[in-house]
Amino acid sequence: MNDALFVPACVVCGGRLKRNGVTSAGKTRWRCTACGASTSRSRPDRAHAAQLARFVDWLTGTASQAGSRAASTRTLRRETAWCWRVAPTITGDGVVHDWLQLDGFYAAGLCCLIGLSPDGPVAWQWCDREKHASWAALLHQLPAPRVVVCDGQPGLLSAIADVWPSTVVQRCLVHVLRDVKTNLTTHPRTPAGQSLLRLATHLTRITSIAEAGDWLVTLNAWWQSFGELTTQRTYRVDVADTDVPSWAKPTQTWWYTHARLRRAYRLLTRLAHHGDLFRFLDPALAGTAVPATTNRIEGGINAQLRRLLGCHRGMPPAHQRRAIEWWLWLRWADHPTPASLIRPEHIHPPTPTPEPEPDGPTLWGDSLTAEEGLWARKGWAGRSHR
C-alpha cells in the first residue's frame, strides 16, 4: 500500500474523509464529511518500513539498544523481532570491474568471503573456511575482472586459475612483507637475512617502473652475494640429536641449513617471476588504478566489521552474521531501500504443519512408562496405616 493508492473512505457510509487531528497515540484521526463518523486508519506498510529502518540503523551502528531511537530496549526488541528474518542479498549487475579485492573475514564460527570493487562490496559468501570450493562459489557470482588483488591464499589462487583463467593477480605487498618477516623475524641476526629484509621492506615504497626494475636488480645482486646460503644442506649423520630441528621428520636424512632464509628468498623470486609483485605498474593496465595492497578491504571492511561486532558483543552467531550482511549490503553501490526487501513471510512466517499421528495403539515403543513399574514410589501412596 502506498500514498497513491490510499484513498480515505468512510467504513460506515463510504463518504469522503478528512483529517480531524490526532489520537492520544499520535495517529491521524479521520472524520466523515457525510455521516460524521470518526475513525483512524493504520498503515502496516509504513509501520513495518519504519521498524526495519530502526532495526538496521541500530544493527549497523555503534549505539546500544538503550541509545537507539526506540522508546525502550523492550520496545525495540518487540517491534523488530521479525526483522531478523529479512536477509539482504546483493544481486549481480554483470558489470566487469577493472579490479577486485578479495579476502576472508572470520566471525560467528564461519568465514565470510568478501569481494570489493572500486565502488564498494559486490558479493559475499559464507563458508566454513577459505578453500577452493568456497572461493569458486563466490567467483561464479561475478564476471571476471582484469585484476584481482589478494593476500595469496592458496585456495583463492587455485579458484581464480579455474574460474577466471584470464584474470591476473596482484599480490598484496604488505602481506608479502609480512610473510618475509615471518621467516626472517623482524631482527635477523645474519647479514644475509638483514639485507633480504631491507629489500622486502622497500617493496611497499615502489611507485614507478624504474624503481621496480632497480628492485629486481638488487634482488639479483643479493643472490650473487648470498645465494649459496640458500642451497647449503645439513645431514643428520653430521650433527648430534640435540641439534636436529624440531620440524625435521624422523626419516629425513638432510635439510636445508638456512631453511627460513631460503623460503623467504624463494617467495620473492617466485612472485617476481610470475609478475605478481608489480602488476599495478603494468602499462597495459594504465588508467585502472590497480592498488598494490589490500588495505582497502582490510581497513575499510574487515576492521569495521570487527568494531561493529565488538559494539554488539553477546549476540548469537546467527545474529552476528545478519549484522555483517546488513553492513555490507548498505555499502553496496546499488542497494535499494531496506523496506523493498520486506515480504509477507517475514512478518507472518508460515506455521509448520505437524506430522500426522499414526492411527491405533502403539504396538512397540522405546520409551519408559509408569505402567511398567519402573518409577520409584514416594510418599504414602499405596501404603496402609498400621
Image (spheres, rainbow, N blue to C red):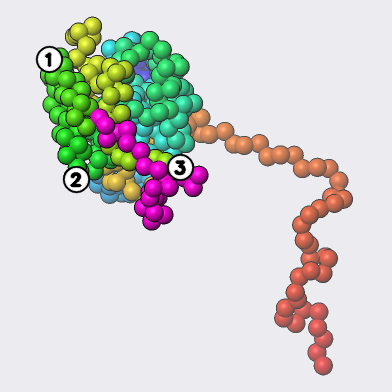
Residue hosting label 3: 253
Corner quadrant of residue 305: top left
Amino acid under disc 3: Thr
Q: Residue 235 colored magenta?
A: yes
Q: Mark 3 or mark 2, which has the lower sequence index?
A: 2
Q: Residues within 10 Å of mark 2 (few under 14, many from 20)?
A: few
- The answer for how far apart the CA atoms under marks 3 and 2 are is 27 Å
Of residue 70 and residue 14, the one placed in the foreground of this image is 70
Q: Position of residue 43 (x, y in %)?
A: 38, 29
- Is residue 341 left or right of 196 when viewed as pictured? right
The residue sitting at the bottom extreme is 386
Q: Position of residue 378 (x, y in %)?
A: 72, 78
Q: Bin the neighbour count of mark 1 within 10 Å (Cα to Cα): few under 14, some 14-19, many 20 and up.
A: few
Q: Which residue is mark 2?
A: 189
Q: Looking at the picture, how far across and down is residue 360, in whole percent? A: 86, 46
Amino acid tagged 2 = Arg
> Counting residues from the N terminus, which is met first, the one under dot 2 or under dot 1?
2
In three-dimensional space, the C-alpha distance between marks 3 and 1, rounded to whole angstroms, equals: 45 Å
Q: CA distance from mark 2 to mark 1?
A: 31 Å
